[in-house]
Image (cartoon, helix red, strand yellow):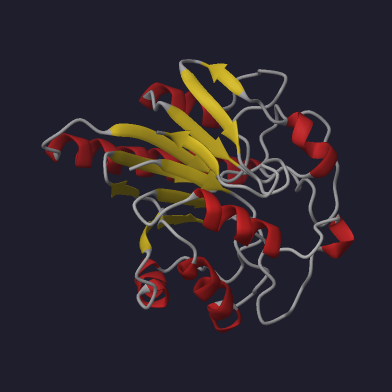
Amino acid sequence: MRLFAIGDTHLPSERNKDMHRFGWTDHPLPLERNWDATVTNDDAIIVAGDISWGTRPSEVMGDLRWLDARPGKKVLLRGNHDFWWGDSTSKLKKLFEPFSSFVGFIQNSAVEVGPYLIAGSRLWTAPEAPPMPGGEMGDVELKPDYIERETRRLQLSIDDAKAREAKATSPKIRVCAVHFPPIYANGLPTAFSRTLEAWKPEVCVYGHLHGPGIAAGFVGQHGGVRYVLASCDAAQFKPVLLHD
């Protein structure tokens, strides 16, 4: 089983919100073609937040069907634009129940799929972030209480992963999946990077960054972890291979 990731699918929802003004021509058709040509049903793929422009569950069913139709076993994660997601784990389970390719979602928890053990959280913009473009597809306001909360949620997810690992009958490949960058191109450690690097995952995948903001993300090795940016435009609208 291979592990892929793609972030920021920004599917149109029932609101029919297109991405043309951001230069994403005919989205999501290029992503659909690349996904179907790259990922198989035997693979797993992390969908790293900003899944849909929907604001309530009733608006995202078409987008969820679109995801379900793509090859691979999906692990979902919330992004800052996923207002439909909500905080109720039981409601999310019910929402995702009809979609057989959805094998799990991260919400203060971890997900096991094949040999992979995946933990993470949405995160938020860290105070160590360099100046970045704003706007609808740009950076968000710095909120210290969000940073504290998301660090706590990340740790809860890692703790769940550790508990699962202790019960596992075979070694697991640790993967961290988040939406916001845990560390930036300046290489300055953040509360998020310190927390996840202490767990020592093999790879951490994130999204959120677009256009001129892509350069702000850290890509490569830091603290023993390989960081990968997989937002749609950064990945050229093709799922990124994390582990083969």
Q: Nearer the viewer, residue 146 or 24?
A: 24
Against 218, is 213 above or below?
Answer: below
Which of the image's four quarters has the N terminus?
top left
Left or right: residue 74 versus residue 221 is left
Query: Can residue 138 be seen from the camera position used here?
Result: yes
Where residue 216 sits in the image (x, y, percent)? 75, 30
Q: Is residue 34 above or below residue 168?
A: below
Instruction: Tell me if 192 is positioned left or right of 104 in this view.
Output: right
Q: Position of residue 51 (x, y in %)?
A: 60, 61
Quadrant housing residue 16: bottom right
Q: Residue at coordinates 15% horizontally, 33% vertically from top-left? A: 170
Image quadrant where residue 168 sits: top left
Residue under the point 42% across and 33% down: 243
Residue 197, x across and y down, in percent: 45, 23
The correct choice, above or below, for 96 with respect to 147 in the image is below
**Image-quadrant location for residue 196:** top left
Instruction: Assign the C terminus to one quadrant of the image.
Output: top left
Tally the marks.
Answer: 0
- Depth check: give the residue in front, 100 or 32: 32
